[in-house]
Amino acid sequence: MIEIDSIVKTYEGVPVVDAVSMTIQPHTICAVVGTSGSGKTTLLRMINRLVTPTSGTIRIDGEDIRGIRPYELRRRIGYAIQGHGLFPHWTVAQNIGAVPRLLKWSKADISARINELLELFQLDPSQYRDRFPSELSGGQQQRVGVARALAARPNILLMDEPFGALDPVIRAKAQEDLVAIQQRFGTTVVLVTHDMEEAIYLGHNIAVMDAGKLLQFAPPKQVIGRPATPFVQELIGTSERPFRLLSLSKIADHLEDGDADGDPLPATATLRDAYSELLWSGRSAAPVEKDGRLVGRVSLDALARLAARPQ
Amino acid sequence: MSVTSASPSHDRPHWLALDRLGVLITLILLSSFLLPFALFRANRILLGDGLPLLASMQPVAASVLLLALAFGVGAALLRLPALIKLAAGFGVLTILFIAMGLSAETLMPADNNYARVSPAAGFWVLVFGLALLVTDALTRLRLGPWTRIGILLGVCGAFWALLWSGLWNELSILKEYANRAPAFWNEARTHLLLAFGSVAIAAIVGIPLGILCYRVRPVRAALLNILNIVQTIPSIALFGLLIAPLAWVAANVPGAKASGISGIGVAPAVVALFAYSLLPIVSNTVVGLLGVSAPAVDAARGMGMTWLQRLVQVELPLAFPVILTGIRIVLVQNIGLTTIAALIGGGGFGVFVFQGIGQTAMDLVLLGAVPTVVLAFAAAVVLDAFVELTSRGGRRA
Ligand SMILES: Nc1ncnc2c1ncn2[C@@H]1O[C@H](COP(=O)(O)OP(=O)(O)OP(=O)(O)O)[C@@H](O)[C@H]1O
Ligand SMILES: [Mg+2]
């Protein structure tokens, strides 16, 4: 659990993070969104003491971080910085093994962990271990940066726009991977992004920041349905709201009984995908399959109800 | 090739076009014929007579040299591949050097150890023109660092073979050498010791000072300003200025005199050379460290490296090429400056230079100056290659 308690950071008297308070529950993903310069990075960097707050306190599992030596605190927290920040003079393997080395893991453990992570991110170890960062594509560099942050199996992971340089396909894959890793290891993730779509997909909670202030801190459904201020509403995009709402749930959670014509849709797809497919194929309903069996149907009528503003 | 020659605007082969630098080189080579090739003097301090190329050697040798030069002009003028130009340049230089030795053998009267034959202006102009051809070809070839070091070794080997063969023994500069071979090697050792030693001490002191300047901002401006002032003191003045304080130290600090410290000699020479070396090393260390990519430093902090781990594992390795560049500047500078140390009894090749000036014996001046230039040049080539090797983002060549 990360408790942020009326934290303030001023540079030359100008508040950059202004009295922000929020509690990030353990084993959840918190997505921090906001326009450029709104203080997202600064807020994130106060959690691992890279930035010293002007006032306020931050506690991790109840312990005030001011009581922990900065370098010890940071070794416990994974940090993927904005732009990968890989060491250009070290190979991919050396980069990923950096924190485990600081923690004095054995050579064999470090090596095994490097291979495990490279495989997780679909980079063939035999091919990529000994490459230098300059020999990787931008997207590969970013993935190695995230792998490095995960190397020592931290309980907390801070990520600053980790998927910015990825193309939509790889980005979607990386987001899925992050969700999988987060669920498997129960990591608490604080993720900065300025992509609302990403925040809605990944975040259990979304923190919306503007000019240093925390405007809203709530689950995606609530941020979409009940934006705290006009600014939050603008950030979500007024015309996008119903679709964003649909993208939050899977077909499986809203099955109707009955049958329909045409190709079936997978139960794991989001309602948004279903809506899009129905419109495109000109049907008013479609069958839904799960593990190769038809389990029910999804209809435009039902989707229209689910896309309406929550009451 | 076929593509170029097929284009309508070129009906001549590509290599037949004129090379602009080649025209300049040709003019330089041709102008050498207006100047004497060799200088003959009845003894080492008299003014001598300049002899044109044709009068300097046997007709056979002269015609071979002229033929080689004509070949060199051709290689320079035409747009030939750089490798051919390089081979031509080195080949013609070799023939020129051999011809100079033959010329000395021809011109020296038998049984006369007082007469002197030395290269004259025309020879030097030819060397300059051909060196231009070689360096231009080397630049165009963009050779890797190891190849460059290899070529340097090859050239050194060729020179050593030339000297060892005795072909140049009749030349004045080697006559001067023959008269003082033990002293030459003695001064060579002193010269190297002074130049390399002062740079080593400056690196040992300067790099930590640079790190201090990098980490403690207020120190930075103050220290760099002081070192800047030191750098502006003319070198002879600095050598002179140190005589009084060091003499005082020698006289008043117990044990100082016994350990070799005195107002003149090696001590003030080392101190002065050290003082000159400090600024480039300190400032390059600071610049190198400041230039380390900010995200890398940030990531190092963010993953929990202590400041020492960050310095040793990330900042210094990434700044190393720039620091090495500072050491290169200083080493080349000090190899030259050490010559002046002879003025205050520091020894080194400068001894011959100043003796030569005193005796108006130019050959003796050259005996000191030529090895200094060669050393400085070799140091520059080797260190440039190292800088390049270390600055490839840590990648091995
Ligand atoms: N060290 C600093 N000194 C002075 N001002 C700073 C410093 N670091 C950040 N700021 C200012 O604080 C504000 C917030 O910066 P921050 O990096 O937190 O923004 P951000 O929300 O991460 O923006 P982006 O999306 O562009 O990364 C900016 O106006 C920035 O100029
Ligand atoms: Mg930022």
Image (cartoon, rainbow, N blue to C red):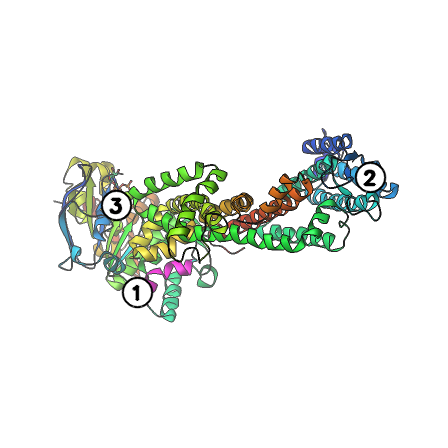
Q: Secondary structure at mark 3?
A: helix
Question: In the image, what residue occupies the spot 15% across and 60% down?
Answer: A61
In front: label 2 or label 3: 2
| A270 w.r.t. B79: above or below | below
**Helix, strand or loop under label 1:** loop
Q: Position of residue A110 (x, y in %)?
A: 36, 67
Q: Which residue is more in the foreground, A136 or B51?
A: B51
Give the amino acid type for the residue marked by disc 1 in the picture: Leu
Location of mark 3 (residue): A41
Disc 3, ligand 1: is the CB inside 8 Å? Answer: yes
The residue depicted at 78 percent of the width and 34 percent of the height is B49
State yes or no: Cβ of the residue under disc 1 lies below 8 Å from any atom of ligand 2. no
Q: Circle 2 is placed at which residue position?
A: B56
Provide the residue designation for mark 1.
A103
- Range shown magenta: A92-104
* Closer mark to the observer between disc 3 and disc 1: 1
Residue at the (40%, 65%) spot, across then down:
A115
Q: Dot 2, crowdedness within 10 Å: few (<14), some or many (≥20)?
A: many
